[in-house]
């Protein structure tokens, strides 16, 4: 007999003018064989066909908010405020669960009576036709702690399911890397982090603009100095620089 038959997942999708990619995401959520799921969509008042796509699936959506927001992480905070599940997952428009029974397999991977604080796994990168490209460059470590992210974001944000009791809002001072900061804060509070040993997410590889990439890396550096201290951060970055030079 399984210990956690009625674990509930809150799946949150944030959208803005996402008509080209949203349907795949919705279908991957509603075709999950595991049914204790609430699906929350936070839309930033889209001007394209996003809302009419959502409308077609409305009987499967527990909560829809459509109004202007102050960006991605503000919208994600709204999602948090509507969530009532045991675990939260942020599935961006364009991303999807790896298989129809991904959530079922995740629940089955949990052993023991105590629920882990974080469930995590691997991420596959796919193109717009949902064809597999490759696995994410950084792979999920066997043992994950809050210190692990000194090596970079080893677990993709979408493949990081946090227990609702540990969740706090995203820090809106960060425009690009608030998810990095958020995961570290949650891991600092977590006692038990559980590696599901599953590929959880198909991540749509669209690529960030170079400008945003730079801003994102600067933010990440700020977050690392705040969470890990200067000395440790500089030491880890020195290794990144050295490694990049050795590769040339």
Image (cartoon, helix red, strand yellow):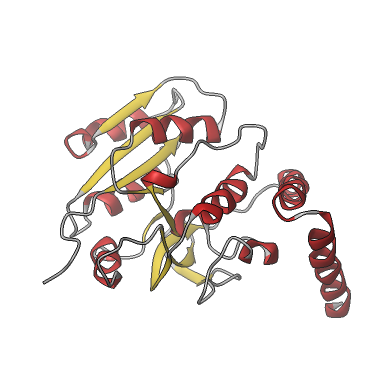
Does 64 appear above or below 148?
Answer: above
Name the residue nearer the viewer: 104 or 61. Answer: 104
Residue 194 placement, left or right of 244: left
Residue 187 placement, left or right of 220: left
Query: Which quadrant would residue 239 be assigned to in this image?
Result: bottom right
The N terminus lies in quadrant: bottom left
Name the residue nearer the viewer: 232 or 13. Answer: 232
The location of residue 196, given as percent across then percent down, is: 38, 71
The location of residue 45, given as percent across then percent down, is: 44, 22
Q: Residue at x 55, y 52 (%)?
A: 183
The location of residue 130, given as percent across then percent down, is: 41, 61
- Give the residue furthest to the bottom: 246
The reply to whether residue 17 is in sight is no
Q: Residue at x 28, y 61 (%)?
A: 103
The reply to whether residue 71 is in sight is yes
The location of residue 86, given as percent across then percent down, is: 30, 48
Residue 210 placement, left or right of 57: right
Name the residue nearer the viewer: 131 or 90. Answer: 90
Q: Residue at x 51, y 23 (%)?
A: 69
Does 237 appear above or below 158?
Answer: below
Does 48 appear above or below 180?
Answer: above
- Give the residue furthest to the left: 1
The C terminus lies in quadrant: bottom right
Q: Residue at x 29, y 69 (%)?
A: 110
Does 75 appear above or below 120?
Answer: above
- Give the residue furthest to the top: 67
């Amino acid at each position: 007999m399984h210990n956690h038959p009625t674990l509930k997942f809150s799946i949150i999708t944030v959208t803005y003018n996402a008509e080209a990619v949203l349907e795949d995401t919705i279908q991957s959520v509603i075709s999950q064989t595991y049914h204790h799921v609430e699906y929350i969509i936070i839309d930033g008042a889209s001007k394209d066909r996003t809302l009419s796509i959502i409308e077609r699936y409305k009987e499967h959506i527990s909560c829809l908010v459509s109004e202007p927001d102050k960006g991605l992480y503000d919208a994600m905070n709204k999602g948090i405020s509507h969530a009532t599940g045991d675990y939260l997952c942020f599935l961006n428009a364009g991303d999807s669960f790896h298989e129809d029974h991904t959530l079922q397999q995740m629940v089955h991977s949990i052993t023991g009576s105590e629920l882990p604080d974080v469930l995590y796994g691997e991420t596959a990168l796919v193109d717009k036709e949902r064809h597999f490209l490759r696995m994410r460059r950084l792979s999920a470590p066997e043992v994950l702690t809050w210190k692990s992210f000194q090596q970079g974001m080893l677990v993709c944000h979408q493949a990081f399911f946090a227990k609702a009791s540990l969740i706090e809002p995203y820090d809106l001072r960060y425009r690009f890397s608030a998810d990095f900061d958020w995961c570290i804060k949650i891991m600092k509070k977590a006692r038990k982090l559980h590696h599901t040993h599953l590929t959880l997410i198909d991540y749509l590889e669209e690529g960030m603009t170079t400008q945003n990439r730079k801003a994102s890396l600067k933010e990440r550096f700020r977050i690392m100095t705040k969470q890990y201290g200067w000395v440790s951060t500089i030491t880890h970055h020195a290794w990144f620089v050295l490694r990049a030079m050795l590769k040339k």
